[in-house]
Image (spheres, rainbow, N blue to C red):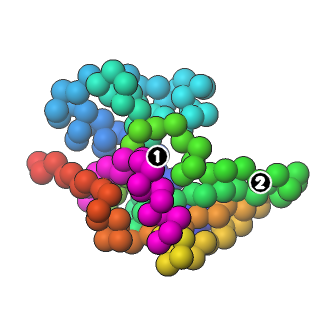
């Protein structure tokens, strides 16, 4: 298993934490669309409050968020845009598995402009070779995103 996927591919656990600590706790109306092929292709896991599309990203890190920009398929030399750009969600919701902290990042034009102008210049693109696919992502300190995120943690 590659480093990138070791750090962030705990999807089911993060989705469960989000549902338990946020949706169920606040009794938010929701639709689970994780098994819907159309929403899966659009990178949407839940629809809350009728029309707010949520994509859950789970990480083992407590200081960084990871943004997949694109993938290169070695066999065909095809490059595909990563979830960071093609997701149809309104929010990326990052679940920090070690602490159960939930970080909301609204996908706005303002954020993408900031990402292009500042994040890309400051944090290098990391290449992660996974046999048949090479993933390219950025490891971004949470503190550098403070103006764009909301953090939540349910205390039990």
Q: Residue at x 59, y 25 (%)?
A: 38
Q: Which residue is drawn at 66% across and 56% down?
A: 70
Q: Distance between the residues labelled 2 and 1?
A: 23 Å
The magenta stretch is 99-118
- Is residue 146 highlighted in magenta? no
Establish if 90 lies above or below 57: above
Judging depth in this view, the residue of 66 and 89 nearest the camera is 89
Q: Residue at x 19, y 52 (%)?
A: 153
Establish if 48 lies above or below 112: above
Determine the secondary structure under disc 1: helix
Judging depth in this view, the residue of 24 and 89 nearest the camera is 89
On the image, numbered disc 2 is attached to which residue? 79
Q: Label 1 crowding class (10 Å Cα cut-off): few <14, some 14-19, many 20+?
A: some
Establish if 152 lies above or below 144: above
The reply to whether residue 30 is in sight is no
- Is residue 108 highlighted in magenta? yes
Q: Is residue 70 left or right of residue 121?
A: right
Determine the secondary structure under disc 2: strand
The reply to whether residue 75 is in sight is yes
On the image, numbered disc 1 is attached to which residue? 11
Q: Is residue 12 left or right of residue 43?
A: left
């Amino acid at each position: 298993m590659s480093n990138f996927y070791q750090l962030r591919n705990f999807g089911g656990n993060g989705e469960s934490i989000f549902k338990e600590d946020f949706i169920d706790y606040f009794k938010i109306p929701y639709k689970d669309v994780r098994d819907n092929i159309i929403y899966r292709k659009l990178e949407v896991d839940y629809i809350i409050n009728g029309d707010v599309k949520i994509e859950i990203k789970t990480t083992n890190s407590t200081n960084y968020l990871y943004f997949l920009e694109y993938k290169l398929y070695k066999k065909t030399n095809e490059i595909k845009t990563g979830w960071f750009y093609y997701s149809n969600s309104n929010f990326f919701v990052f679940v920090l598995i070690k602490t159960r902290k939930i970080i909301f990042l609204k996908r706005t034009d303002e954020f993408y402009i900031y990402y292009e102008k500042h994040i890309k210049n400051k944090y290098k693109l990391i290449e992660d070779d996974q046999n048949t696919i090479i993933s390219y992502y950025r490891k971004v300190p949470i503190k550098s995103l403070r103006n764009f995120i909301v953090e939540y943690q349910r205390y039990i």
